[in-house]
Image (spheres, grey):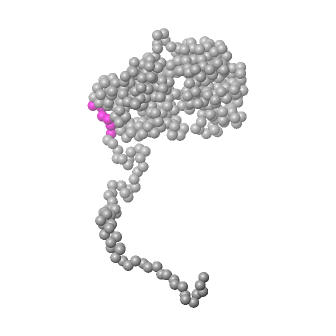
Amino acid sequence: MRPETVASLAEKGITHPFRIQQLSLPLALDGHDVIGQAKTGTGKTLAFGIPLLERLEPGGTAPQALVIVPTRELCMQVAEDIAEAGKNAGARVLAIYGGKAYEPQIEQLKKGVDVVVGTPGRLIDLNNQKILNLSQVKSLVLDEADEMLDMGFLPDVEKLVSKVPATRQTMLFSATMPGQILNLARRYMTQPTHIRATDPGDDTATVDAIEQHVWRAHSMDKPDLISKILQADGRARTMIFCKTKRAAQKLTDELIDRGFKAGAVHGDLGQVAREKALQQFRDGDIDVLVATDVAARGIDVENFTLLINYTCTHDENMSLHRIGRTGRAGSDGVAVTLVDWDDLHRWKLIDKALGLPFADPIETYSTSEHVFTGLGIPKDAPARLKPAAPREDRPGRPERSDRNRGRRKPDSAKTPRRDEGSAQGAEKSTKPPRRRRRTRKSPSSPES
């Protein structure tokens, strides 16, 4: 490795490799194609980031390395990690993703970049416009390939792969490895080495540093239960995953109304609003981030210790990646999963697939004893940190006009009762009816 790269990593406190890095770096640094599989949060980014930085040649203008990722949040995170690792070597790294203006990305491409990290849609757009030149790419990386498969990006990925030179190094990294991903690797990789970084005798898919709690909870009691969990002793930044955009925003508004510093990240928010919420979360301005699975990958925040699954995921892969947001890089973490009664059968399948011991989640309410003892929550923890706001002042609710607020309809405006209406009708019926004038024919008029 270059001394500049070693120095950049040391500045971040990275002096020893993780297991996936130990196994993959010798092969990747020699230029071999690699398929890397490891648990979420175990250092896969640097396992491919360091080799592609080592292959860069100074003085070029077109990108020499291309990293394809499924989501915008992951794109920003991977680009930041590679830029920090290549800082002292002067590596120019650009994140390309949708939801932002084209002009800044185009301007930086024209100035020259070494590494491009991007989502498939925006990469194809810029390549079709002849702005993104992929003819000089020597290193191609597919990160979180299983997620790209789930999101339907496989045709876009194949189109991008066809644009880069056939003579290249290709690396594919993911936490899970479905059969379609292996088929993709066979088509576009040259004698790849499949590395699966797990410890001997470890049959679970999540890292051991994560303490897990799985509870069967009622949907009506979940807001109170979440409020108690957020008052756990020593709680730092917390992420809550919801199934839908509407549920995420509703829970965020509810937590803010209860006095918690919460923000939301979901698909109904613009890219600027999503980036602002993530930055506030990193800076500590808010300590609770409610998100949909759009942010399940790519969020790597220091001192992030608690993750809550507000609902059961649709499969074991998504559960794995949600839980993998905490307990990253060897740090400890706590994951709480709330399972609805209707999702018990699905959860048993997930539990079996991940090798977890929670096939029958314990029935749990906000007053249950094990909630307080298991997470170190004070017995007198309230469901609200502040009184409920008036209905018209709650976030997300339209205000009523001052003219009608708090007023009752005057008696005169009430709908008349049936007997009153009939009496009024009787009074009107005493008036003589209006008669229509009829025109008679003149006797002298000729007959038709």
Residue 168 lies in what quarter of the image?
top right
Apparent side of residue 231 relative to residue 108 in the rendered image (left or right): left
> Magenta part of the protein: which range?
380-386
Q: Nearer the viewer, residue 14 or 76?
A: 76
Task: Tell me which residue sits at (40%, 31%) in the image.
Answer: 342
Task: Tell me which residue sits at (60%, 86%) in the image.
Answer: 446
Q: Quadrant of the N terminus?
A: top right
Q: Residue furthest front?
A: 447
Question: Is residue 385 highlighted in magenta?
Answer: yes
- Can residue 373 be seen here? The reply is yes
Q: Main secondary structure of the magenta part?
A: loop
Q: Residue furthest top?
A: 200
Tag count in the figure? Answer: 0
Task: Tell me which residue sits at (35%, 73%) in the image.
Answer: 428
Apparent side of residue 421 relative to residue 25 in the rendered image (left or right): left
Residue 135 lies in what quarter of the image?
top right
In this rendering, the answer to whether 94 lies above or below 430 is: above
Question: Is residue 280 highlighted in magenta?
Answer: no
Q: Position of residue 250 (x, y in %)?
A: 42, 39
Q: Position of residue 4 (x, y in %)?
A: 61, 19
Q: Quadrant of the C terminus?
A: bottom right
Q: Position of residue 98 (x, y in %)?
A: 59, 36
Q: Residue furthest bottom?
A: 444
Q: Nearer the viewer, residue 232 or 226?
A: 226
Q: Nearer the viewer, residue 26 or 201?
A: 201
Q: Nearer the viewer, residue 96 or 114?
A: 96
Q: Position of residue 27 (x, y in %)?
A: 62, 13
In this rendering, the answer to whether 250 lies above or below 59 is: below
- Can residue 78 be seen here? The reply is no
Task: Tell me which residue sits at (64%, 32%) in the image.
Answer: 123
